[in-house]
Image (cartoon, grey):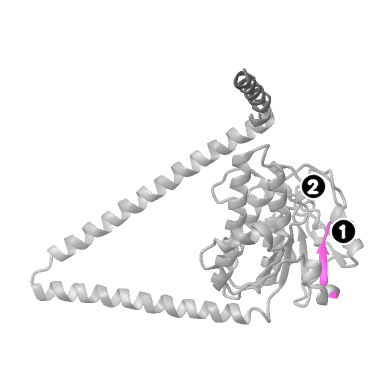
Amino acid sequence: MEEEKETEQNDQNTLESQPNSQPTPLSKNAQKKLLKQQKWEAKKAEKKAQVKEQKMKEAERKRKEWEERLSSCASEEERLKLIESRRELRKERMEKRAEEKEDKLQRLSKAKEFGQNIVIDLEFADLMTNSEIHSLVQQGLVSYDSIAKNFAVMCEMALLHLKEVDGYIAKTSDDCISLVSGLSIVDNRQIMYCYAVNRRCTSPSHLWLTGCRGEMENQLQRLPGFDKWIIEKESQSYIDALQDQKENLVYLTADSETVLDELDLKKIYIIGGLVDRNRWKGITMKKASEQGIQTAKLPIGSYLKMSSSQVLTVNQVVEILLKFVEIKDWKASFFEVIPQRKRGETDSEELQGVDGEDLENEDDASDKKKRCIEVRSTQ
């Protein structure tokens, strides 16, 4: 009898515990995001397989060409000479790569004393949705890629408060698990690409990583050779990490009354990374004012009349600054970077700022349209 009661009690406990053990169903919006991310992952895997197959075909083609060259040799002596010349050529390439690597390391070491300081402020994660953070991450990739297109430039990229982004991801994991895990990986790729591009620059930057703590630090440690990177790794935000240079901090914001005429190597220019969709107007100006740091805006109004919004994307602002460092010409820099549909050449007397719609990133190398980050930090 007691055994039957105990069995009934266990069954009841099992029934009561079942609802709690079932996962909370995803909302329709979350399901759409998850499906979209899964499609993106599938397409990415397919493209990766195609690239791998193409590389294998190219390697096979070169192997056959080499065998044909060997078989076409008239004598064994000629064949040996061909093999030896190939070995010498390979040796020269390896020596050249070693020299280039050493030069890069020396430039990176010297870059700690030189370079135009540029900071990307990523402390707005708690104000953005999943898709907006995804846009921020994607645009960051474009920004870093744009540096590679500007060879004789000096810059210092600082990725700030990345733990905020990682923290936001952790809080939203129930909404879109696949998307969240993807974002965490892409964040690390941004940093890896940034460092790789920085190493290739003729005049590399003094690179800073701030906000490196917790799970973000764990993820960074997984990157190949991270401990050997010639880079500054800080667990603080820019206001704390650069507190001894607070007087040199300049937040670029479209709401500033100060026009940026020249770039000062002593200054540290901050770009706000925020997909605000017009919800957070003036937030970067407010932040800078509360922190007691300087503000400025790009002199776009002196050279262009924007056809819609004067709010630029992060990668556009970065590329404009890099271009100006290279050619010292604002107008040419704007025309080089800002898409034709967003600008129009006119006299400075006719130029006034206008509000408009969000921008879409046209700088993506694959020509795919992606939602870009609106930067309240520049015109």
Q: Which type of secondary structure does the marked residue at label 2 adopt?
A: helix
* Quarter in which the C terminus is drawn: bottom right
* Residue pictured at 84% horizontal, 73% vertical: 246
Quarter holding the N terminus is: top right
Task: Please tell me in which quadrant of the rendered image residue 162 appears.
Answer: bottom right
Q: Position of residue 316 (x, y in %)?
A: 69, 56
Report the Cα–Cα distance between label 2 and label 1: 14 Å
Mark 1, Cα crowd under 10 Å, few <14 / some 14-19 / many 20+, is few
Question: Where is residue 377 shown, x and y percent of the image?
Answer: 80, 57
Please, what is the three-letter code of the amino acid marked with disc 2? Answer: Leu
How many marks the image carries: the answer is 2
Q: Position of residue 222 (x, y in %)?
A: 55, 61
The residue indicated by pointer 1 is 287
Residue located 12% across and 68% down the image:
73
Pick the front one: 62 or 192 = 192
Image height of 45 relative to 317, above or below: above
In this rendering, the answer to whether 257 lies above or below 208 is above
Q: Say what amino acid the circle numbered 1 marks.
A: Lys
Question: Could you tell which of marks 2 and 1 lies nearer the N-terminus?
Answer: 2
In depth, the one of 143 and 27 nearer the eye is 27
Observer able to see residue 176: yes
Residue under numbered circle 2: 127
